[in-house]
Image (cartoon, helix red, strand yellow):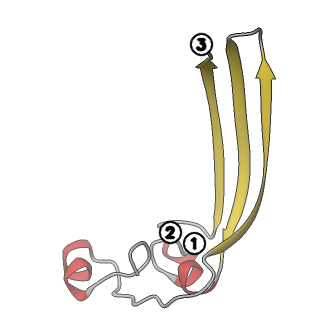
Amino acid sequence: KTYFSITPTQSDTTGISAYDSGGGIKDIGVGAALKYDWDAHWILKGKLAFTRLLGDARDSPLANSETGRGSENQFKLGMFIAYRF
C-alpha cells in the first residue's frame, strides 16, 4: 500500500485513478555486481540489476505501462568508488 496504492484524495490531486493495492510478492529479479581493487586503498564497485513487478504492484497505475506513467520492468545501475583506511 505504501508504494503502489493511490488514495481518493491523491487521485483528486493528481488525476491518477484511485487504486488499493494488496499484499504479496512485489517483484522478481536478477542482478550482478563487480568489485575491483585498484590498490590497497581504492575500490571500484558496480551493480546492474533487472526486476519485474508482479501482482498488485504491476497493476498499479504508477507502474503500469498502459497508463504511460511507469513500467513493470525496472532497471538499476549503480557505481561507486570507496577509499579504505
As helix, strand or loop, the secondary structure at mark 2 comes to loop
In space, the residues marked 2 and 3 are separated at their CA atoms by: 47 Å
As helix, strand or loop, the secondary structure at mark 1 comes to helix
Q: Which residue sits at x=59%, y=67%?
A: 71
**Sequence-wise first label, 1 or 3:** 1
Pointer 1 local density, CA inside 10 Å: few below 14, some 14–19, many at least 20:
some
Q: Position of residue 83 (x, y in %)?
A: 60, 15
As helix, strand or loop, the secondary structure at mark 3 comes to loop
- Judge from the rendering whether residue 14 lies leftward or rightward of residue 38; answer left or right: left
Assess whether mark 1 and mark 2 are in contact (beta carbons under 8 angstroms).
yes
Q: Position of residue 12 (x, y in %)?
A: 20, 81
The type of residue carrying mark 2 is Gly
- Which label is found at residue 65? 1
Q: Which residue sits at x=34%, y=81%?
A: 6
Q: Nearer the viewer, residue 6 or 16?
A: 6
The type of residue carrying mark 3 is Phe
The type of residue carrying mark 1 is Ser
| Residue linked to disc 3 | 85
Q: Nearer the viewer, residue 67 or 82?
A: 82
